[in-house]
Image (tube, rainbow, N blue to C red):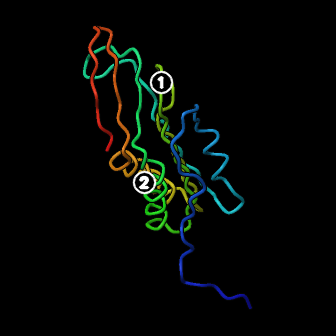
Amino acid sequence: MPTTSSTPVPGEVVFAGISDTPIDSATAWDAVESAHTGAVVSFGGIVRNHDSGREVLRLTYSAHPSAPARMAELVAEVAARHPGTRLWAAHRVGELHIGDSALVAAAASAHRGEAFEACRDLVETVKAHVPVWKEQFFADGEVEWVGSA
């Protein structure tokens, strides 16, 4: 007779990184999906054409040199909080245009509830604690820096 363990399987970090090349949700989705997962939830933070009623032309994201290590550490912490999940997260740096992905995250688990919870935790944790800064270029010629961490 097979035995089962009551100890949850720890979450797995499939990828956590800072990228100077385009990122997309299909890559994240494909990476976390497996024969053991019944649900995949993905998030795409997309550059929009406005902020606080002002027209945005483009953004530039800059990261502290510690950002890749901090990203890996934070995603591992999220995985520890969500046993049985598979997680993927990347934040883009460099010049981005309207419609480009700035942050992509995905979480897979056996059930949808756990996948939704893990993906939200992943996104909120990355946004709050990874040392990445956004420089917004507005149509009126003004520039504004916004800190992600």
Tell me which label, 1 or 2, sits earlier in the chain: 2
Helix or strand or loop: what does disc 1 sit on? strand
With 13 as the anchor, is 33 left or right in this view?
right
Q: Residue beneath label 1, please? A: 96
Viewer-nearest residue: 107 or 147: 147
The residue sitting at 39% across, 18% down in the picture is: 49
Q: Residue beneath label 2, please? A: 70
Viewer-nearest residue: 114 or 131: 131
The residue sitting at 56% across, 51% down in the picture is: 88
Provide residue 136's location: percent of width, then percent of height.
34, 22
At label 1, which amino acid type do we have? Leu
Query: Is 14 above or below relative to 132?
Result: below
The residue sitting at 57% across, 73% down in the picture is: 9
Q: Look at the image and tell me in which quarter the C terminus lies.
A: top left
Query: Is 136 above or below relative to 11?
Result: above
Q: Badge 2 local density, few (<14 within 10 Å), some, or many (20+)?
A: some
Q: Badge 1 local density, few (<14 within 10 Å), some, or many (20+)?
A: many
Q: Nearer the viewer, mark 1 or mark 2?
A: 2
Q: Identify the residue at the far top of this view.
A: 140
Q: Look at the image and tell me in which quarter the N terminus lies.
A: bottom right
Query: Is 4 above or below relative to 137?
Result: below
At label 2, which amino acid type do we have? Arg
Query: Quadrant of the rendered structure where residue 27 is?
Result: top right
Viewer-nearest residue: 70 or 27: 70
